[in-house]
Amino acid sequence: MKNIIEFHLIHDLPSQYVIPPVPSKKIIPNWLKKMPTHNANPHNNDSDPTIKKCVPVLDVMTAGYTILTHMDIILSLRDDNVLDVHSLNEDHKQAILKYPPIEQHGGHQVSGSPFETMKMLKYMNPWRISTPANYSLLFIPPANRFELPIIPLAGLVDTDNYKSMINLPFIHTELAIGGGQVHIPAGTPMCQVIPVYRADW
């Protein structure tokens, strides 16, 4: 029997705002595609393999599925640390009002953590995810994608039993008080999800 992961859209979103999750192997970043497989070693006449030849690096970057943002999200922080969500046009504004893509975590929820001084946001994931019996989903930041300013908190969810929505807490490294707007384009990798089999060790 084949293992099947299911992504169920929970909102009646307009078609332009439906961007399904994709297998992670389909969104290999351009920097990795352009990287040579070998580079000259500056200390001798040999050439050494780059990380493009490292199987563990490739395997984790292509593992599972990646949730993409389903609409443009434009944010800024006021001087009093209040979050503003901006719109591109009237249609986009109405979509944001009807289906807010972002919420905030209260600062008290992360007090005492290493990221307590950062603005903790929550991506309102429009997909309910289910997996076969005994399979959970590991939610991690897109692996080795250090160029992305979005860092979701990692989590492990028993998606064979848990049927509610799984929204994604994250920080945006470029979002700062008085720092102007940050734009998260639709289709931006938000979180990588990897099915894992639960077993006792």
Image: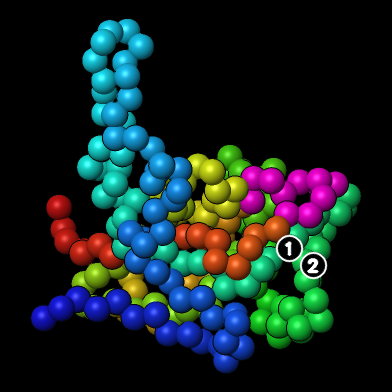
Q: Is residue 45 above or below residue 150?
A: above
Furthest residue toward top: 43
From the top left corner, tell me how far across and down residue 116 is, in percent. Answer: 65, 45
Residue, disc 1: 74
Q: Residue at x 61, y 52 (%)?
A: 171
Mark 1 burial class by Cα count in 10 Å: few <14, some 14-19, many 20+: some
Q: CA distance from mark 1 to mark 2?
A: 5 Å
Q: Which mark is residue 127?
A: none
Asked if residue 67 can be seen in this view, the reply is: yes
| Relative side of 186 to 163, left or right | right
Q: Is residue 136 inside the magenta stretch?
A: no
Furthest residue toward bottom: 12
From the top left corner, tell me how far across and down residue 92 is, in percent. Answer: 74, 78
Q: Is residue 88 above or below residue 182?
A: below
Asked if residue 164 can be seen in this view, the reply is: no
Amino acid carrying mark 2 in the image:
His
Q: Residue at x 34, y 51 (%)?
A: 61
Residue, disc 2: 86
